Image (spheres, rainbow, N blue to C red):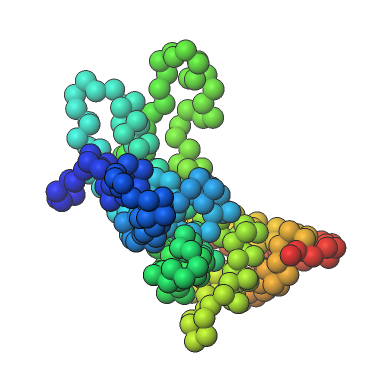
C-alpha cells in the first residue's frame, strides 16, 4: 500500500525479554539474602511499565467474551487493537481490489485466485472481535497495593473508546457497503477439485463460493460478542465502576448504537441490500432471544432494552413501509421482520430466576 514494510515479528529480544532475563539471571555477588530479595522486588515492581505489561491465557481466553481487557488478544500486534484492525481490513480490501490481479497470469489455475482471496477474511473476523471487546471492557492491571503507577487492578474502558469501537463496527462490519465485491472477482473464486488425503473436494458445503455466509459469519462474530451475557452483564456492572464525573457508556447506549448501525434503512426509507437483510434478521434474532430468554441468563435491564428495540423497529417499519422509495424485495423483508416481532411478542416469556 505504498508504505515501507517493517518486521512481521520481533527478531531481537524486546523490553520484556530483557526484564525477565534480568530477574532470572542477575548476579548479585556476595549480597545477603535480604539484599537480593530487595533487588528482585525492585525488578518485579517494574511490571506496570508499558513495555512490560502482559496477559496470561486466562486473561485472553482466546476469543471468548469472558476476556475483559480489549488490549489482551491473540493475533493482535499493535498497541491499539482498533487501529490495528482497521489497518488489517485496509490491507484485505487492497488485496481483493488490486493485489489479487497480480496472480492472474497466463497458465495459473483459478484455484490460486481463491487461495489468495481467502487470506483476506481473517482480518475481518479478528477485527470484529477486537473492537467488540471494548464494549463493557475493563483494563486489567497487575500492579500490587501501593504501586500507583497504573491505578487499581480494574479500570473501565473509557466511554470515548467504547464509542470509537462502536463506530468501527458500524463502518467496517455492519455498514451497507462494508463488503463490496465485483462480479468479475466472484466468478473467479472456484473450488479445488484435485484429490487430497482427506477427500475434501467431496465434502465442500457448496461448489460456488458462499459469499453471504462468510459475510454473515464476520457480522455474527461481532453480534455474538456484543449480546453475550458476559458483556451485557459488565455493561450493567460497570456503571458502578466509573469514577465520579466520568462519562458512562451504558447498556442503553450499546443497544441504541447497535440498532441504529444496523437498521438505518427503516428511518430514512431506503432499499435494503442482501448483506443487510441477513444482518438485520440476525440482529433481530439476538434481540428476540434476549427478550424471550430467562432472567437467569441475561441481566434484567437487557430484557427491557430488547423489548424497546422490538418496539422501535416495529413502529418505525409500520410508519415507513409504504414509502415509494422501497422496492418489492425490501417490502417483503420488512413484512417478515414484523411477523417475527409479532410472533415474539405473542410468545410466553420466562420470568423465573435472577442473574447475579
Task: Please state which of residues 297 and 279 is positioned toward the viewer in this rendering.
Answer: 297
Quadrant, the C terminus: bottom right
Task: Please state which of residues 326 and 195 is positioned toward the viewer in this rendering.
Answer: 195
- Quarter-wise, where is residue 29 in the image? top left
Placement of 192 over or under 25, stated as above or below: above
What residue is at 51 percent from the left and 30 percent from the top? 206
Placement of 25 over or under 245, stated as above or below: above
In this image, 31 relative to 251: left or right? left
Q: Which x, y percent locates residue 199? A: 50, 15
Q: In this view of the protein, can residue 326 be seen by the observer?
A: no
What residue is at 62 percent from the left and 59 percent from the top? 230
Q: Which x, y percent locates residue 87? A: 29, 54
In this image, 26 relative to 168: left or right? left
What residue is at 34 percent from the left and 30 percent from the top? 115
- Quarter-wise, where is residue 337 in the image? bottom right
Task: Please state which of residues 277 and 65 is positioned toward the viewer in this rendering.
Answer: 65
Q: Which x, y percent locates residue 91? A: 28, 48
What residue is at 33 percent from the left and 50 percent from the top? 31
Placement of 240 over or under 201, stated as above or below: below
Q: How many marks?
A: 0
Q: In this view of the protein, can residue 286 be seen by the observer?
A: yes
Placement of 86 over or under 157, stated as above or below: above
Q: Residue furthest bottom?
A: 245
Q: Which x, y percent locates residue 333? A: 59, 58
Amino acid at each position: 500500500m505504498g508504505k515501507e514494510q517493517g518486521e512481521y515479528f520481533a527478531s531481537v529480544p524486546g523490553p520484556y525479554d530483557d526484564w525477565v532475563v534480568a530477574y532470572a539471571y542477575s548476579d548479585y555477588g556476595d549480597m545477603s539474602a535480604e539484599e537480593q530479595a530487595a533487588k528482585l522486588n525492585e525488578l518485579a515492581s517494574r511490571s506496570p511499565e508499558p513495555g512490560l505489561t502482559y496477559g496470561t491465557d486466562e486473561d485472553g481466553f482466546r476469543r471468548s467474551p469472558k476476556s475483559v481487557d480489549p488490549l489482551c488478544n491473540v493475533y493482535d500486534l499493535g498497541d491499539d487493537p482498533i487501529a490495528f484492525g482497521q489497518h488489517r481490513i485496509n490491507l484485505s480490501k487492497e488485496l481483493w481490489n488490486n493485489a489479487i490481479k497480480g496472480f492472474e497470469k497466463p497458465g495459473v489455475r483459478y484455484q490460486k485466485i481463491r487461495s489468495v482471496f481467502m487470506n483476506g477474511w481473517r482480518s475481518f473476523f479478528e477485527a470484529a472481535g477486537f473492537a467488540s471487546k471494548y464494549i463493557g471492557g475493563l483494563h486489567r492491571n497487575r500492579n500490587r497495593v501501593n504501586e500507583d503507577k497504573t491505578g487499581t487492578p480494574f479500570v473501565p474502558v473509557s466511554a470515548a473508546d467504547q464509542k470509537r469501537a462502536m463506530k468501527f463496527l458500524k463502518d467496517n462490519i455492519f455498514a451497507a457497503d462494508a463488503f463490496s465485491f465485483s462480479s468479475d472477482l466472484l466468478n473467479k473464486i472456484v473450488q479445488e477439485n484435485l484429490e487430497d488425503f482427506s477427500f475434501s473436494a467431496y465434502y465442500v458445503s457448496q461448489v460456488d463460493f458462499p459469499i453471504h455466509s462468510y459475510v454473515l459469519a464476520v457480522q455474527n462474530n461481532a453480534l455474538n460478542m456484543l449480546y453475550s451475557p458476559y458483556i451485557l452483564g459488565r455493561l450493567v456492572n460497570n456503571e458502578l465502576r466509573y469514577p465520579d464525573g466520568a462519562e458512562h457508556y451504558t447498556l442503553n447506549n450499546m443497544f441504541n448504537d447497535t440498532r441504529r448501525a444496523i437498521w438505518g434503512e427503516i428511518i430514512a426509507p431506503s432499499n435494503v441490500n442482501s448483506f443487510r437483510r441477513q444482518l438485520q434478521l440476525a440482529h433481530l434474532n439476538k434481540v428476540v432471544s434476549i427478550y424471550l430468554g430467562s432472567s437467569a441468563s441475561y441481566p434484567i435491564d437487557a430484557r427491557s432494552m430488547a423489548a424497546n428495540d422490538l418496539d422501535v423497529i416495529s413502529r418505525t417499519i409500520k410508519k415507513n413501509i409504504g414509502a415509494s422509495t422501497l422496492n418489492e424485495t425490501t417490502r417483503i423483508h420488512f413484512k417478515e421482520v414484523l411477523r417475527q416481532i409479532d410472533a415474539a411478542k405473542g410468545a410466553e416469556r420466562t420470568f423465573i430466576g435472577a442473574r447475579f
